[in-house]
Amino acid sequence: MSNKFDADCRLKSSDDSADEEAQTKDNQKTDKDPLPPVEINPTEHKLQYAYALWYSRRSPGKQPNIQSYDQNLKLVGRFGSVEQFWSLYSHLIRPSELTTHTDFHLFKVGIKPMWEDEANQRGGKWIVRLRKGLVSRCWENLILAMLGEQFMVGEEICGAVVSIRFQEDIICVWNKTASDVATTARIRDTLRRVLHLPASASMEYKKHNDSLKSSRFSRYLNMIPQHQHH
């Protein structure tokens, strides 16, 4: 399987401020003028949902605001069939080879990987923290389970995120309804099974609303001069 996709997912090749400008327009188009539906050849094996893969990289230590986070999201590609998925996936660099502070976001088409998206506003995410060396296998197992509808929770799954960090890697599964305890428990149990999680793996559920509040509070603190901090 080819790993020729460069570390910045072909999005930052040296000759390309023009490409970046086009990419920004593509991202804006996703919001204001939705992209056309994903076309699927009749001979292909159609997935239950079409998906979009996004990529982001942020500067360590900086607390992104909504606008900068949105602008930082780069659409890598979309797919609606098994064949289209493998065509995209086989050219991607593996998560373990990504640079620190880099994320892949695999979400259903029509749902942007942001707390503020309507599909995510009342939802939350399961967070799995992994020691180094496990992330590529776990990410592949997770997305194959997601595409194959192994979670058995109807339309509850919004997407998944893999985040590469300095001392650990993080995998998250986002769902629509944080208050639905039975659904979140089923997602947790399926995650444990499909990831073959070691006993040492840490799992935590967090509502997006709580993440949003803590993010706003952090930004508020950053605006206060240092001598006013207690």
Image: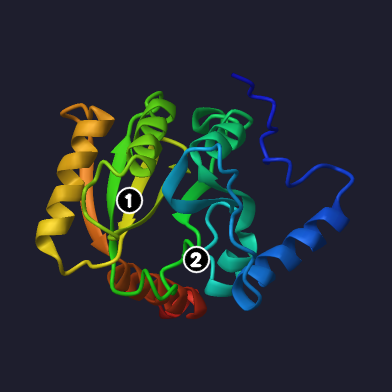
On screen, residue 200 versus residue 170, left or right, reads left
Residue 110's tag is 2
Q: Quadrant of the N terminus?
A: top right
The relative height of residue 99 versus residue 205 in the rendered view (above or below) is above
Q: Amino acid at mark 2?
A: Gly
Q: Position of residue 169 (x, y in %)?
A: 40, 37
Label 1 is placed on what type of residue? Val
Position of residue 216 measured from the top left corner of the image (x, y, whole percent): 41, 76
To which residue does mark 1 refer?
Answer: 173
- Secondary structure at badge 2 equals loop
Which image quarter holds the C terminus? Answer: bottom left
Residue 163, position as x, y percentages in the image: 45, 44
Are the residues tagged 1 and 2 within 8 Å (C-beta)?
no
User: What percent of the width, then of the height, locates residue 27?
Assistant: 66, 65
Indicate the secondary structure of the residue bearing disc 1: strand
Disc on res. 185: none
Residue 171 vs residue 194: left or right?
right
Give the left or right position of residue 41, taking residue 146 as reference: right
Identity of the residue drawn at 49% across and 52% down: 51
Q: Is residue 51 left or right of residue 156?
A: right
